[in-house]
Image (spheres, rainbow, N blue to C red):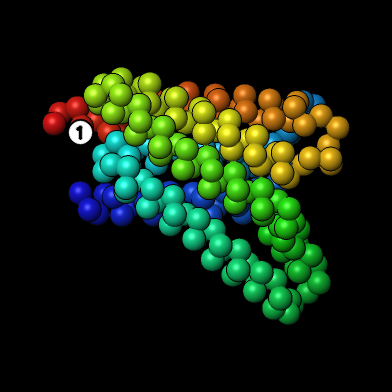
Amino acid sequence: MQNKLTLLTAFFVTSVVIANVLAGKIVAFGDYVILPAAVVTYAFTFLLTDIINELYGKKAAQRAVFFGFYAQIFAMVMIYVGMLLPALEQEMQNAYEMLLGQNFRFVVASMAAYFVSQNWDVWIFNKLKNKTNGRHKWLRNNASTMSSQFIDTVIFITIGFLGAVPSLGAMIVSQYVVKLALAALDTPLFYLLTRKTNRR
């Protein structure tokens, strides 16, 4: 059981760090849906905290969230150190800075959105689990993830893009719709990966 918790926490922390790296690539689906490539990877983090919360409790999920926060800080420091090192070619340095050199405003937006939304996810999931006496797993999984994704989207886009884009509301809605779809799709995975609790 302890090995499984360690593995789930490791996947969670890895997903958080990788999401910050992938955020450097912006993808577009048509003219209206524009979002960072990190949206898919980051969606898994809410699923993983829900699984940890379901199997090991609120404290274990909260611990994973803090581990992820510390890992982000460590990764950003290491990326910055790598940026200061002399590159063999200037093109290599430019590519490195373009992909990994995050704007300070986006760093603040990302960290604030992560800390608030992930802690909300853990809290509301546990609250709903206690309210329903452990029944209706689909309810706590979807309600916690969907509300957390909304909080994450609003905080990140507001801090990161306020005053920089003409339609903040449209940007929030388009990103949240994609996150909402991903949140709905993770319910079968949640049931599959927490099925042992049913047998108990």
| Residue 149 horizontal/vertical position (percent) | 55, 33
Q: Is residue 100 visible?
A: yes
Number of numbered discs visible in the structure rendering: 1
On the image, which quarter does residue 157 sit in? Answer: top right
Determine whether, in the image, residue 178 is placed left or right of residue 139.
right
Q: Amino acid at mark 1?
A: Lys
* One can see residue 29 in this view: no
Q: Is residue 74 above or below residue 161?
A: below
Q: Is residue 184 above or below residue 43?
A: above
Q: Position of residue 150 (x, y in %)?
A: 58, 30
How far across and down, in percent of the image, does residue 9 sit? Answer: 37, 51
State whether residue 169 is above or below residue 116. above
| Image point (59%, 44%), residue name | 113
Residue toward you, 112 or 77? 112
Pointer 1 local density, CA inside 10 Å: few below 14, some 14–19, many at least 20: few
Quarter of image, res 140: top left
Horizontal arrangement in the rendering, residue 129 relative to residue 69 (left or right): left
Q: Is residue 156 left or right of residue 12?
A: right
**Mark 1 secondary-structure assignment:** helix
Say which residue appears at 54% left-offset and 66% top-offset: 74
| Residue highlighted by disc 1 | 196
Residue drawn at 66 percent across, 30 percent down:
175
Quarter containing the C terminus: top left
The single residue placed furthest to the left in the displayed view is 200
Residue 147, horizontal then vertical, whole percent:
52, 28
